[in-house]
């Protein structure tokens, strides 16, 4: 019986320590923000051309790649948050983190897509979930998101 109590105490202690353990921060040291001209080349992944004319290949989840390959954003002044992979590819944070912005006329704008018929906003290009029309690119003030 004593062994069961000790075992139970051990499990409770281990669980408590695990619950209190600090999870990694989104702003850890491997996180980066890059900015440059969005370059879309036939047959190649999207890339960002920095002010120093360095070409950084971009990658991310399916929805993020949808944004990066949207022809309406070609040559846009793009800012992206993410991390560099060991191969040197910049992995943009997942779409739900809102990790991409366009700089235009001195303003930092969130990239969104809008169906004016159904009043539905999405964060990746494609067909409206309701009417199936192509959504319009709608760059917005991020404070209104």
Image (cartoon, rainbow, N blue to C red):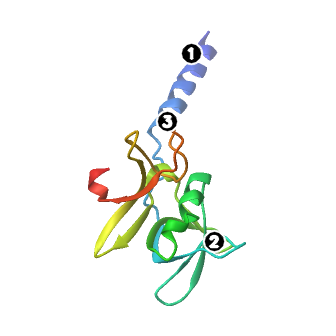
Question: Is residue 138 visible to the viewer in this orientation of the structure?
Answer: yes
Reply above or below: 99 against 96. Answer: below
Q: Residue at x 60, y 21 (%)?
A: 7
- Secondary structure beneath dot 3 equals loop
Marks 1 and 2: in contact by CB < 8 Å? no
Q: Quadrant of the N terminus?
A: top right
Check the image and name the residue furthest to the bottom: 52
Q: How many marks?
A: 3
Q: Residue 19 versus residue 46: which sits nearer the camera? A: 46
Q: Of callouts 2 and 1, which one flags the residue occurring earlier in the amino acid sequence? A: 1
- Secondary structure beneath dot 2 equals loop
Q: Of callouts 2 and 3, which one flags the residue occurring earlier in the amino acid sequence? A: 2
Which residue is under mark 2?
A: 89
Where's residue 50, x and y in %? 49, 83
Marks 3 and 2: in contact by CB < 8 Å? no
Callout 3: 10 Å neighbours few (<14), some, many (20+)?
Answer: few
Where's residue 122, x and y in %? 45, 47
Which residue is under mark 3?
A: 130
Which residue is under mark 1?
A: 5
Disc marking residue 107 = none
């Amino acid at each position: 019986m004593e062994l069961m109590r000790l075992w139970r105490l051990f499990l409770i202690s281990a669980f408590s320590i695990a619950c209190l353990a600090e999870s990694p921060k989104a702003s850890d040291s491997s996180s980066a923000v890059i900015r440059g001209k969005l370059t879309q080349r036939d047959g190649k992944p999207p890339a960002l051309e920095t002010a120093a004319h360095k070409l950084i290949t971009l990658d991310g989840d399916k929805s993020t790649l949808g944004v990066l390959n949207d022809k309406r954003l070609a040559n846009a002044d793009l800012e992206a948050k993410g991390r560099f992979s060991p191969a040197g590819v910049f992995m943009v944070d997942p779409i739900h983190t809102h990790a991409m912005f366009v700089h235009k006329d001195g303003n930092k704008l969130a990239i969104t897509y809008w169906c004016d018929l159904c009043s539905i906003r999405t964060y990746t290009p494609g067909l409206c979930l309701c009417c199936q029309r192509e959504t319009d690119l709608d760059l917005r003030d991020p404070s209104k998101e």
